[in-house]
Image (cartoon, grey):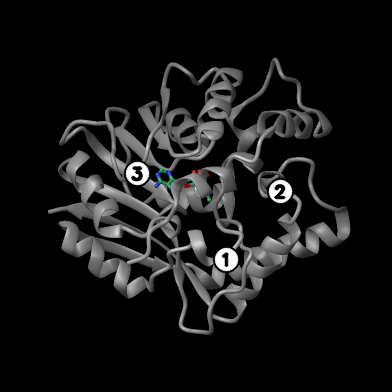
Amino acid sequence: MKNIDTKVVDKHYGSGGIMDKIEAGLRQAGKDFNLLTVDDLAPVDGFHTRGRLSTIEVAELADIKTTDLILDVGCGLGGTPRYLASQYQCNVTGIDLTEEYITAGKQLSKLVNMHDKVTLHHASALELPFDNNSFDIVWTEHVQMNIADKTKFYSEIVRVLKPSGRLLFHDVFRGYGDDPIYPVPWAENKSISALVKEKDARLMMEAAGFDVEQWHTKTHESIEFFKQVAVKIKTDGPPPLGIHILMGDNAKEKLKNQAQNLNEGRVSIALGMARKV
Ligand SMILES: C[S@@+](CC[C@H](N)C(=O)[O-])C[C@H]1O[C@@H](n2cnc3c(N)ncnc32)[C@H](O)[C@@H]1O
């Protein structure tokens, strides 16, 4: 198993000036900062395929209750924690390796008045700073493709989940075609990319102590989504606010490569739910 240098991952995502870029995008979109809502941030704070749409699909797998304690592992800017807290009125904690995302995420939570319900920490998925049996639900979206040690990744999640607690996931996997083309949104090159096939990830979850109850491959839906976005950008140009502003100068190339990777079966996308046995 190769090692992934977490400093390179932090540098990849924390490119500097993120909050300025988000504020500029919000201004350009004509948003009033005094009336800002969780939905206003949705175009930029869901750094995963199909944005808010897929977050809703994942949430619907779990019958989330107001009393559920939720942890988002690799929460990025904290968009999903804010969405879940506002939608289900529950308390949500997020951790992420990229310090700049956590700093910006706390500012964004304040801007939309969600800082009482959402707690964000700078931490590694491989050393979760929580006691055993702490959470009802652990959520993770588009993170494990940056983590080589998936045994540790899933065993840390099992550890912090309460008995019968649920893991909700939405991830990128290695497809059955040729090697992926880089750069992609999660990596400039393969040094910080650790893709495994869907069937292997499922086996790793089971080995860590999960019963995988739901697995839905969403590659087709993701391909369609990329096509629709491409048409919209061709007609209207890039939107003022979107995850492209998190991807640096070569955002266009990263998104184009990922669309090609999906089209050619080099990567796949799936979401689902697994229960701690
Ligand atoms: C593509 S972003 C997804 C962010 C968020 N889950 C979302 O959907 O908006 C990947 C995130 O994984 C985080 N990440 C990568 N490796 C990590 C690790 N070992 N521990 C914690 N977070 C990690 C990155 O810092 C980044 O914020």
Horizontal side of 42 relative to 203 (left or right) equals right
Q: Earlier in the sequence, mark 1 or mark 3?
A: 3
Query: Between residues 63 and 197, which one lies in front from this camera angle?
Result: 197
Q: Quadrant of residue 93?
A: top left
**Is 224 drawn above or below residue 126 in the view shown?**
below
Cβ at disc 3 under 8 Å from ligand 1: yes
Question: Which kind of residue does numbered mark 3 sit on?
Answer: Ala
The residue sitting at 54% across, 26% down in the picture is 103
- Res 84 → quadrant: top left
Decide if ligand 1 comes within 8 Å of the CB at mark 2.
no
User: Within 10 angstroms of label 1, few (less than 14), some, or many (20 or more) residues?
Assistant: many
Percent from the top left, x then y, of residue 83?
49, 35
Instruction: Find disc 3 in the rendering and name its residue.
Output: 125
Q: Between 143 and 187, which is closer to the camera in this rendering?
A: 187
Q: Circle 1 sits on which residue?
A: 222
**Tally of marks:** 3
Q: CA distance from mark 2 to mark 3?
A: 24 Å
Q: Give me the residue at 39% from left, 66% from top.
A: 216
Q: Position of residue 234 (x, y in %)?
A: 85, 62
Residue 157 point in image, percent of width and height: 25, 46
Disc 1 from disc 3: Cα separation: 26 Å
